[in-house]
Every structure is written in structure tokens, then in C-alpha cells.
Image (cartoon, rainbow, N blue to C red):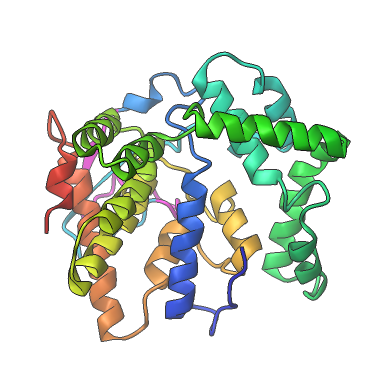
Amino acid sequence: MQHQSAIDSHFMSHKQLLAFSLFLSSVVLMLVFATQNSGDSDHAPIRLIMHGSSSAPSGDSNHQNDTHLTETLTTNTVIADPLEQSKDLHAIFEQNKNAQDAARQQLAYRAWRTCLPNFAGTGGDTLRQQMQLLADNTPQKIAYRQLTERCKNFDQLSADEIRQQQEIQQTHWSDGMVRTAGERASQLLQQEQYAAAMQAANAALATRNPQALESLRGFVNAYLRSNSLDEEQQAALSIRAQAFTLAACQLGYPCAADSLQATEQCAYSGVCEGNIRERLLAAFPHDAGGDRQRQQLLSDSARILKELQAPHPDLQTLLNP
């Protein structure tokens, strides 16, 4: 994935906004519906925090108050994710590649997709050549080195082993074993099984699992493509899709500047400043139109979090204007 550099150090152009959206959509391919060791954290209580409340966590860039909203939902704890915690993604892959349960298979798949082909093996020549043009102290090159360090033990595999594992992981993807909740719903939507797709998406929403919520961003984008919408409706729904990421960040999805997703985005695109939330908000133009889009993103995120307070949250409600 190749992206243009930022025009200035604080805000991204329209091309970069598109690149950012494509990057996050690709990351959805690597997320899991449930993670190893997550335990009961998938159903952690959601607290309502009023704007300006002293109970909001301080010093955590994932939980900043929104200046234009009167209330927000948040949790105190970022979910446990073995990939986030591991400095050796090959070890995660080896520990889980032959597991029988889907959650561990998904961990292996995510580790594989994170590292290959760009940060291990011989397939990342294009990105490697791009990095050689950068000064060693640039954030993008630092992020690249961090990922190659975490992926370096994949180089223990021979070329034949890499090809074999690639075929295995592709089979797991094709048969749905390693798809996220949102991806499974998207697949049903693409197969024109609308009722089944909405049922699967609602089931994901009802878990209130931050990773499942993040994966619904891809489903909303698939929904956008599957419906005849005018340009204004498409733009509004595209922002609402991004709001699922923003809401997931507030519920404990790993969105810090040093999270795996943020580090990958930095290495691929050169967009390295701030955490995922801050990058989403900075991606709009710095003008009156961009300010309205930022406000819509914040409002849509609050709308999602409010819907999650319902006993039976309904995704269709969130897809309506």
C-alpha cells in the first residue's frame, strides 16, 4: 500500500483522507471477533461520563473530551490483545496456527497478515526501497523498523514454508474461519443475503465488543456500496463508518499512537502524528467544510455509543440518516 506524504504536519489532504480510509479498511481484514485472554472484558460495563467530568481518565489520549458534545461513553481499560502485547509476532503465529478454535486461528492469521509480505520474507522490496530513501530519524522509518523487529522471526521460514502457509491462511480466509464479525456480515451483504447480513451485524453490535464494533466499519462501507445513494448520502454514511472506529476507541479498542494499527499506518502512509482518534479528526480539511465533517464524526460516534446503551441495539437505526 502506497500513500502520499502529508502536505503539512498537522492535517491531511483529500487524497490522504482516502488513503487513511483504505488503510483502516484493510486493517479490518486482520481484526478478530474475540481475542485470546479477553475473558469477561468483552462485556465490561459501559459508563456514561458527562462532558468535563472529573471521572474521565486523565493523561490517556484515547479518552479525550469532545468539545462539541455534551456526553460520551467510555471505559477505563484498553482491551487485552496478545498481538498488541507481543514483541514476537512469529511466536504468536506458531502458538496458534494449528489451534482448533476460531479465536486462536484468527490470532495466527492476524500475525501473518501483519508481517507478510512487507515486514518479513522477501516480498516487501517496494516498501523496503521506499524506507531506504528516508532519514533514519523520521517517524515513518522508525515505525517500519519497529514492525520489522516484531516480525523478524518469520525469516526463519523457508520460501517453500512461506508459500505453504500463505495457501493455508488464504484457505482459512476463504472459508470464513478467520473473518471478523463485520467481514462475515459484509460477505453476506455481497451475496445479497440482506436479512442474514443485518442479523450478523446486529449480533456483532450486541456484543459491545470493541473489536467487533471496529469491524462494523467495513460492513457500513459495504452497505454504502450496495445501495443507490446520492453523493451527499454517500459522504454522510462514509463518515458514519469511520465513527465506528472512533466509538471503538472510546470502548477500549487499542488506538494509542503506539498501538499496532497506528504503527502500521505510520509505516505505510507516513501519517504518524497523534493516536487513531486524533488522526481521524485531523484527516478532514482544515476549513469550514472540514469542521462540519469533524463535528459529524463526533456526533455519529456519540450516536453509536448511545445506541449501545439500549437493551437490544439496532444497527439499522445507525444506518438511517
Residue drawn at (83%, 51%) of the image = 122
Where residue 148 appears, x then y in whole percent? 77, 50
Where residue 54 appears, x then y in whole percent? 28, 49
Q: Based on the displayed image, in which of its 4 quarters is residue 309 positioned?
A: top left
Residue drawn at (15%, 38%) of the image = 314
Where residue 280 appears, x then y in whole percent? 40, 64
44 horizontally vs 89: left or right: left
Residue drawn at (22%, 34%) of the image = 202
Where residue 114 appears, x then y in whole percent? 64, 45
Highlighted magenta segment, given as a residue range: 45-62
295 horizontally vs 40: left or right: left
Q: Is residue 103 above or below residue 284?
A: above
Dominant SS in magenta: loop
Locate the C terminus and report the quarter of the image it occupies: bottom left
Q: Is residue 229 above or below residue 46?
A: below
Residue drawn at (61%, 55%) of the image = 263
Question: Is any part of residue 138 visible from this angle?
Answer: yes
In depth, the one of 159 and 22 nearer the eye is 159
57 horizontally vs 139: left or right: left
